[in-house]
Amino acid sequence: MKALITGAAGFVGSNLARRLLDDGHSVVGIDSLTPYYAPQLKLHNLEGLRGPGFELLEADVNEVDLDAVLDGVDVIYHQAGQPGVRSSWGREFEVYTQNNVVATQRLLEAARRQGQLQKFVYASSSSIYGDAERFPTTERDIPQPVSPYGVTKLAAEHLVSLYGSNFGVPTISLRYFTVYGPGQRPDMAFTRFMQSALSEREIRIFGTGEQIRDFTFIDDIVNANRRAGEATAARPGEVVNVSGGSNISVNEVLDTLTAIAGHRLKVSYVERAAGDVHRTGGSSDKAADVLGWASSIGIEEGLRRQFEWAKDTMDVWTNLPENFV
């Protein structure tokens, strides 16, 4: 199998590429190495990928010749996008529309022209649910995002489903519930917590810390993508939750991390950020039915694995600009 992974230098994209290569497949990766966070960290993600079977195109999905890129590709894993809830307000919104909506539509048009594609897997987000009306939230619940980021992810997801239902592009959208684990982005909570714990810096929490999240370990996300890429039972335009089922508060995470680190953490609490939801929690029943998938890594084990990675990669973070870490 030949796969295309957009956002191949990112957290999920690089882990997925590694898995596909280990399974004997060939991978074409696209990544524009945007400075949303330090490009040095993205280049570190690519270590071990370069070589036979892997080709990296340092390019923007909105600019590259996608017809040429998709030649011979069997499966598209569309992981690229502009992340971050807090940054999506104000003047930066145009970046989100270009990288999350326009880029997805352009890739869908190319996939439609290609004609031989077996599967188009889109990385959606639980942010599309906003403050959901019930938990665990199912795919039948009405999306009501509370951030511009969530709006763009939902718009792109709708496009993915429309190209499936109208043109038969074999699409499937996976709604990720907060992904964590080795390689997590530096702006995400667990990486910030662990870097602070290892350097004895203060951990800043937005809100009271009583907000509840459904965290999903990276290996489980990779497995869901692999199954989605091979899912023959999924109809074009299918949408599926991928949730770890942890349902744990941020304060409980800090307690667990304190035990793992072996010392008390320095924590301060600041005002809740606009666009942050109080709770997320997804049902994975449909993932079990359509993909034969279930999460396998619990939150404590996952946190331990990520903490060991954080310790092992401390040198990578040295001397990075503070706004990147």
Image (spheres, grey):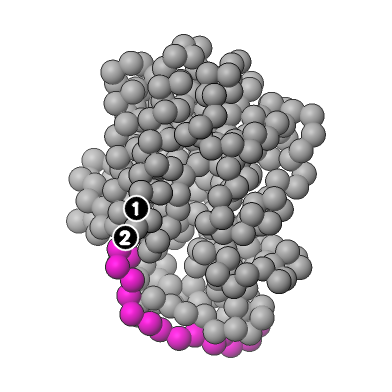
Percent coordinates x, y for residue 175 in the rendering? 39, 44
Amino acid type, callout 2: Gly
Q: Nearer the viewer, residue 228 or 74?
A: 74
Residue range (magenta): 262-282
Q: Which mark is residue 93?
A: 1
Q: SS for tag 1?
A: helix
In this picture, residue 281 sits left or right of residue 132: right
Name above or below for residue 50 compared with residue 198: above
Q: Residue at x 49, y 14 (%)?
A: 114
Please report the residue visible at 47 percent of the width from the left and 34 percent of the height from the top.
62
- Distance of mark 2 from mark 1, alpha carbons? 6 Å
Is residue 169 covered in magenta? no
- Front residue of 181/83: it is 83
Compared with 158, 2 (above or below) is above
- Specify the quadrant of the image occupied by residue 223: top right
Depth order, front residue of 61/153: 61
Q: Amino acid at mark 1?
A: Phe
Image location (x, y in percent) of residue 5: 57, 34
Asked if the residue at tag 1 contacts the one at tag 2, i.e. Cβ–Cβ closer than 8 Å, the answer is yes
Q: Which residue is mark 2?
A: 90
Q: Is residue 121 above or below residue 261?
A: above
